[in-house]
Amino acid sequence: MGNILNKNMNTIRVIKTEKDYEEALKFVEMLMSHDPDPESEKGEQLDLLSTLIKDYETRMFPETLPTPIDAIKFRMEQANLRPSDLVPYIGSRSRVSEILSGNRKLTVEMMRALVTGLAIPAKALLKEPENSEDSIYSNWGTTLLKEMWNRGYFGKKILTNTNGKELLQDFFLNIASPLQIQGMLRKSNYRSSPLTDKHALAAWAAHVFKEAKKIAALKKYKPGTINLNFMQKLAKLSSEENGPMLAQKHLKNYGIILIVEPHFPKTYLDGATILIIKDNPVIGLTLRHDRLDNFWFTLMHELAHIALHYDLGISLFYDEIEGVQAITIDDKELEADALAEESLLPAAKWDISPARLIPSSLAADSLAKELGVHRAIIAGQIRHKGNKYTYLNKIVNEEKVREYFSDGKWNK
């Protein structure tokens, strides 16, 4: 971190180069993994670095605005509006249809009405539609493009200084545009860091979805299959030597595809649920924390979204579960947390367990044996429920999970 911080890590320097930028991102991720108190020294460092990173990005990667039509459609999705709801702002049903289809341009009067009535940013409505397709793929950072290329997202094609837009267009072909995916993310973005790179998140989600489409599920998912009983039985596979792989195979038998793909820099992501194709829900896990207890809790959290929120019309949930302190957490996330916890360590068992008073390895072992799950899961739950994160470190940290999903993913 030599260019960003001095040896004592007390003086943070201005970010001037791409190397400085990458070092700052790594240090921010390290700070966020400790979830520092905002008033502490580390919390102040995180706040200052966040500001410097945003300033650098503003200078080097100017914000890409959506087209006026994308901005209107996104606002409609947010507010659950129908085309007929736009009549007061645009003038008639036929004009609304023409605007949304791109056959008519917005007038100044329409723009004013949409800004005032629907709070759509004026700068988005004023954007010229020409070359709008190209603009979607503009201003993707060089670092992100290199990372996508290194991961093989562009196949055998070579990344050059001039073909980034072409590679991105091919990558998102037949999936969804980055703006559509980002729209899904904004609609269900319940936990997030202000530093999250939405382009990287869109790339990750698109890749996970593409990989899932390559897998032939044995059957279609039957709504209602996932419930507390299903999740508790699945959790018992954790006691097996290759529990994570068994869980992946078991879910596939019920039409649910589990994909593991490492997170990108600036995406502090643990997992996601993708419901674009309802017949086969997709769960993506990043294994950002190489711990067995985190794998099982994140998996249960994503399954909880399927159990609780399958029919709500939300296509994508993504979750930064650990190490990111949210100011507010959506009710749907709290519901998923509660069901995930109940599937791993039922409240009735926790309330009468000695582990509640004495968070010892002996108590964790006893409770794990009683429930038929891995001791690391119980150790993680004891730490979480009791807010005692200094206990049971050995049990939690020695049980790794990435080894089950190697495939060269973790060589970096």
Image: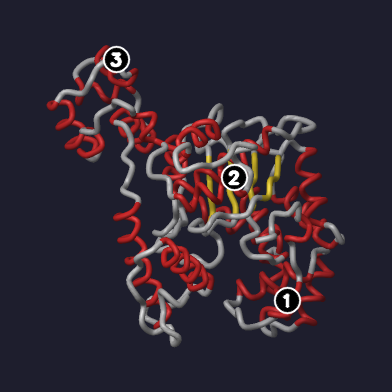
The amino acid beneath tag 2 is Thr
Which mark, residue 103? 3
CA separation in Å, label 3 and label 2: 35 Å
State the image coordinates of residue 209 (x, y, percent, origin top left).
61, 38
- The mark nearer the N terminus, 3 or 2, is 3
Query: Circles 3 and 2: CB distance less than 8 Å?
Result: no
Q: Residue 70: percent from the left, percent from the top?
A: 35, 31
Which disc number belongs to residue 353? Answer: 1
Tell me whether circle 3 and circle 1 mark residues in contact (CB < 8 Å): no
- Ranked by sequence position, the earlier of labels 2 and 1 is 2
Q: Which of 1 and 108 is in front in this view?
A: 1
To which quarter of the image does residue 110 belong? top left
Q: Residue under circle 2?
A: 273
Q: Which amino acid does label 3 sit on?
A: Asn
Given this view, does label 3 or label 2 mark the residue nearer the observer? 3
Q: Where is residue 316 in the image (x, y as percent from the top left)?
A: 53, 41
Give left or right: position of 277 versus 325: right
Nearest-to-viewer mark from 3 and 1: 3
Q: How crowded is mark 1: few (under 14 residues within 10 Å), some or many (20 or more)?
A: some
Residue 405 lies, with reference to residue 80, above or below; the image says: below
Q: Which of marks 3 and 1 is nearer the N terminus?
A: 3
Q: Is mark 3 on a helix, strand or loop?
A: loop
Left or right: where does residue 266 sit relative to residue 39?
right
Residue at the image point whose x is 54% and y is 28% from the top: 173
Q: Where is residue 161 in the image (x, y as percent from the top left)?
A: 46, 43
